[in-house]
Amino acid sequence: MIKDKKTLLIGGSGNLGSAIIKSKLFKNLYFPKKRDLNLLKRNNIKRILKKYKFGLIINCAAMARIVDCEKNPKKAIKINIDGTSNLVEEILSYEAAYKKKIKLIHISTDAVYPSIKGNYSEDSPLGPYNIYGWTKFASESLVRFLDKHVIIRTRFFNKENIKFKKSATDLFTSNIEVNDLVRKIKMISLKKYLGTVNVGLKRHSDYVAYKRYKNDLKPCKRKDIIKDLSVKLAKDSSMNLNLLHKIEKNL
C-alpha cells in the first residue's frame, strides 16, 4: 500500500473531476481552474509542476461527448491528443530535471475496444468505433512514455444527471456510477500496480444501469438512439474485470 501523495487533478470541472473533489478522498488535492492550467499551454504545466512538485496526477481532462467529437474532430484531436502530449512531455522534462518520478492516472474509455462482442480484457485487440475512441487510443499511446502510469479504461455516468427519457435494452456496457468510479480510482492510486486496467461493473444493459436511479425511464432499442443522435454506438463494450479484482485483493 502506498501513502497519499500531493495530487494534481486536471479536469476538475467535469463530471468525474467534480466527483473526485466532492468525495474528499484525496486529502492533499490541488485542482486548478482551466485558466490556471490549460493543457494546450505547456508553460502552464511547467510552472505548476515546478511549483508544487506533485507525486500523483489524475488526468480527467477530455472532450468526451461523442456527438461533439464527431462534429468537430479537429478540436477533439487538439484537446485529447495534443493536450495529453503536452502533459506527458512536461512530466518527462520535470522527471529529468528533478530526478523524481510522477505517477499519472490517465482516464481513458471503453471506446478504444471494437465494442461488438464484449468481455474485453486489457490485452484484447483495440479498434475504436468513433472519433472519441480514436483520440483516446492515441492519448493512451502517449501516456505509455511515462514509467509510472495507470490507464483506466471505463465508462461512467452521474446518477444525478440522467436527463434522457429512454435507454437501450440491447446496448451492453460495464457502465459505473461516477461516485463508485471515484472510490476505485482512490483504491488504485494507493496500489503499486502500473499499466492498463478496466474499471466498471459486470455486464449490463444501459437501460438496467440507469433504471436503478430513474424510475420513469422508458426502454428502447439501440437503433432508436442511433437514429436520434446520428452517431455510431457500441453494441457490447462490456469489459473483463478480472485484473481489477486482482488489484483490489492483492496488489
Image (spheres, rainbow, N blue to C red):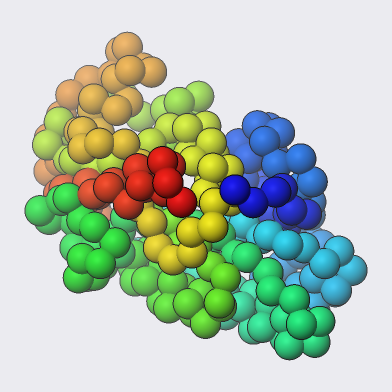
Residue found 60% across the figure and 65% down from its top: 104
Q: Which residue is at the front of the view, 249 or 36?
A: 249
Residue 11 drawn above or below residue 168: below
Residue 215 location in percent, x, y? 32, 12
Q: Which residue is at the front of the view, 55 or 107?
A: 55
**What is the quadrant of residue 170 in the picture?**
top left
Numbered disc total? 0
Residue 218 drawn above or below residue 123: above
Q: Along the horizontal axis of the image, is 100 left or right of 185? A: right
Q: Which residue is at the front of the view, 210 or 228?
A: 210
Q: Along the horizontal axis of the image, is 139 left or right of 137? A: right
Res. 245 in view: yes
Residue 53 location in percent, x, y? 82, 67
**What is the quadrant of residue 47 in the picture?**
bottom right
Residue 15 location in percent, x, y? 56, 41
Q: Which residue is at the front of the view, 43 or 197?
A: 197
Residue 173 drawn above or below residue 196: above
Residue found 44% across the figure and 56% down from its top: 152
Q: Residue furthest right?
A: 51
Q: Along the horizontal axis of the image, is 144 left or right of 14? A: left
Q: Along the horizontal axis of the image, is 24 left or right of 65? A: right
Residue found 53% across the figure and 68% down from its top: 149
Res. 11 in view: no
Residue 230 location in percent, x, y? 24, 53
Q: Residue furthest top?
A: 215
